[in-house]
Image (cartoon, rainbow, N blue to C red):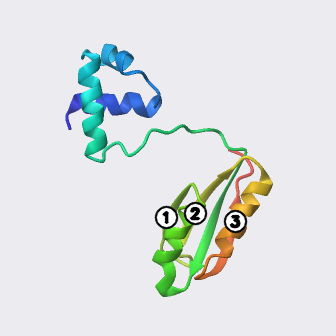
Amino acid sequence: MDNIDLEILKILKSHARAKYVNIAKKIGLTEGAVRRRIKKLQKDGIIRRFTIETTAEFEGVVLVETEPTMTNNVAKRMKKIATRIFEVSGDYDIAAFIQAYTIDDLNKKIDAIRKLPGVLNTNTLIKLKD
């Protein structure tokens, strides 16, 4: 990976749907060269997926205490529910960041986490304002 690849990544991070021809104009390459570089970045695992971000209406953090031998299993299952998860130190084993468009959807995700095998206790923080 070189500086040109880094420039391509920077452009794609700010606009995942940028057209190859527009990227090429910005960095001074041909469209074909940009296409090849992006394919290689995907093949090498540098680019894992192209996505969009939206502003969710409701956001929360769920702190999860697990049975000591179940943390890894719970974390894997939580990846299907939460936007992002982190194994953490302290009183809790996992922190999950959750986004939802409705409070009902947020509650459903929190309940789904609480019902996972190996979950002992949770503490939920709901974002009130930025």
Residue at the image position 64 percent from the left and 70 percent from the top: 113
Name the residue carrying label 3: 110
Please, is residue 102 above or below residue 55 in the view? below
> Dot 3, how many residues are within 10 Å of its Cα: few (below 14), some (14-19), or many (20+)?
many
The answer to whether 51 appears left or right of 32 in the picture is right
For the residue marked with disc 3, what is the amino acid?
A: Ile
Q: Between marks 1 and 2, how big is the CA–CA gap? A: 6 Å
The answer to whether 25 appears left or right of 78 in the picture is left
Name the residue carrying label 1: 86
Task: Give whichever of discs 1 and 2 has the lower sequence position.
Answer: 1
Please, is residue 101 above or below residue 61 in the view? above
Q: Position of residue 18 (x, y in %)?
A: 44, 24
Q: Position of residue 51 (x, y in %)?
A: 50, 39
Q: Are marks 1 and 2 in contact (CB under 8 Å)?
A: yes
For the residue marked with disc 2, what is the amino acid?
A: Ala
The disc placed on residue 96 is: 2
Quarter holding the C terminus is top right
Q: Between marks 3 and 1, how big is the CA–CA gap? A: 16 Å
Residue at the image position 58 percent from the left and 63 percent from the top: 96
For the residue marked with disc 1, what is the amino acid?
A: Phe
Quarter holding the N terminus is top left
SS at mark 2 in the image: strand
Q: Between marks 3 and 2, how big is the CA–CA gap? A: 10 Å
